Image (cartoon, grey):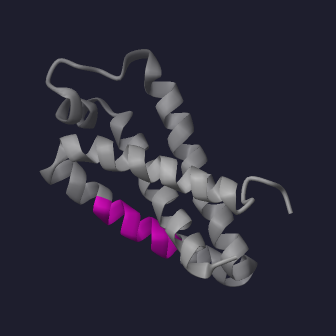
Amino acid sequence: MSAFVLVCALFASALGGFVTLSLAMDRHYEDAYGRGQAPGPSRPWQQLGGAALLLLSLVAALRLRGPAMGWVLWLGALTAAALVTVGLASYRPAWARRVGAVAAVLGVATAAAYGLLLLP
């Protein structure tokens, strides 16, 4: 299993998770989709999906570096993904939803291809 691919899956799923969680908030949803819009009944699903993507990034980090350094790698990836999410949500909110969707699909597809979704 390539370390680079796992790091890409780790970062992509963390970025997708943070963007999904940010779009579950009224303000960021309005910025991305237009004023007067609200997440409505999709909010709990967005929150669940964002949390699942963050959990997937944790699994990727633990598989890559083990329990000792995996947590450190995960926190570093979360920090980088949070910075990218803040930048996108602040300056290009319409891009945030596209980048988040692509990152989420890429993270899940990579994790599925490398068997991260299976228990060890």
Q: Nearer the viewer, residue 115 or 74?
A: 115
Magenta-colored segment: predominant secondary structure? helix
Residue in the picture at 14% in, 23% down: 35
Quarter of the figure that contains the N terminus: bottom right
* Percent coordinates x, y for residue 95 in the rendering: 22, 46
Residue in the picture at 40% in, 48% down: 102
Magenta run includes residue 40: no
* Percent coordinates x, y for residue 44 in the rendering: 51, 26
Quarter of the figure that contains the C terminus: bottom right
* Percent coordinates x, y for residue 111 in the rendering: 64, 58
Residue in the picture at 42% in, 42% down: 21
Residue most extreme to the front: 113
Stretch in magenta: 75-84
Is 104 placed above or below 23 here?
below
Q: Is residue 30 left or right of residue 61?
A: left
Is 95 placed above or below 73 here?
above
* Percent coordinates x, y for residue 79 in the rendering: 41, 69
Magenta run includes residue 82: yes
Q: Is residue 58 left or right of residue 103?
A: right
Residue in the picture at 35% in, 42% down: 22
Q: In which quadrant of the rendered view does residue 55 lie?
A: bottom right
